[in-house]
Image (cartoon, helix red, strand yellow):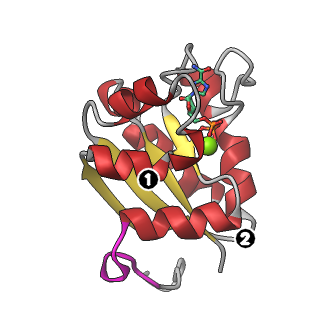
Amino acid sequence: MEQTFVMVKPDGVQRNVVGEIVSRFEKKGYTLAGAKLMTISNELAEKHYGEHKDKPFFGELVDFITSGPVFAMVWEGENVIASARQMMGATNPSDAAPGTIRGDFAVQVGMNIIHGSDSSESAEREIGLFFEKSELQSYTKTIGTWV
Ligand code: RTP
Ligand code: MG
């Protein structure tokens, strides 16, 4: 089953929207395979955002993402990589549609609340950067069989 890496950035943790974001993915119907609150090292930040290393905002981006705890998650389900990106909305929150996470909770591009992998290659790479295999659960939802 397809998996993607999703992370509530330090601004989202500070703004108390971790639960809301988890809830949106749960209600959509995706399955949580792993999650943890963690602080990103400079080394991990530079690897994670390596594709942007020559961009003018790279230094600020690394400083920001390492500035406080993030909530890292792996979500699983059909078409979850593209769907998570739709649920997040456009990179710049001022272009993000209302109803999307960035559209509802953010204003500035530098503090846009959430990260989600942009392709299957990125998802595999990012899940590997942030999670050990032993931190991920594989299970089937058994809704209806508990009562
Ligand atoms: P992300 O990687 O964080 O999920 O965001 P994204 O795919 O929507 O956007 P991407 O192009 O990968 O950019 C990574 C992050 O860099 C910051 N950014 N700042 N100041 C700027 O012009 C600028 N442009 C991008 C954003 O925080 C963006 O999420
Ligand atoms: Mg990106």
Where is residue 144 drawn, in percent x and y?
54, 79
Residue 136 in the figure: left or right of residue 26:
left
| Vertical position of residue 108 compared to residue 72: above or below | above
**Quick check: is 134 in the magenta stretch?**
yes
- Res 30 seen here: no
| Quarter of image, res 90 | top right
| Vertical position of residue 87 compared to residue 123: above or below | above
Q: Residue furthest front?
A: 54
The answer to whether mark 2 and mark 1 are in CB contact below 8 A is no
Residue labelled 2 has its Cβ within 8 Å of some atom of ligand 1: no
Where is residue 57 drawn, in percent x and y?
52, 23
Viewer-side residue, 97 vs 55: 55
Mark 2: amino acid: Glu
Where is residue 141 drawn, in percent x and y?
52, 79
Q: Which element carries disc 2, helix, strand or loop?
A: loop
**Quick check: is 98 in the magenta stretch?**
no
Task: Tell me what residue is drawn at x 41 percent, y 46 percent.
Answer: 46
Mark 1: amino acid: Lys
Task: Tell me what residue is drawn at x 53 percent, y 26 percent.
Answer: 112
- Ligand 1 appears in which quadrant? top right
- Res 80 seen here: yes
Query: Is disc 1 surrounded by few (<14), some (14 to 19) or many (20+) residues within 10 Å?
Result: some
Instruction: Check disc 2 and report the residue beneath it.
Output: 78
Instruction: Check disc 1 and report the residue beneath it.
Output: 47
Task: Tell me what residue is drawn at x 55 percent, y 14 percent.
Answer: 108
Q: Nearer the viewer, mark 2 or mark 1?
A: 1
Query: In the rendered image, which quarter contains the C terminus?
Result: bottom left
Magenta span: helix, strand or loop, mainly? Answer: loop
Task: Tell me what residue is drawn at x 72 percent, y 24 percent.
Answer: 96
Magenta residues (range): 131-138
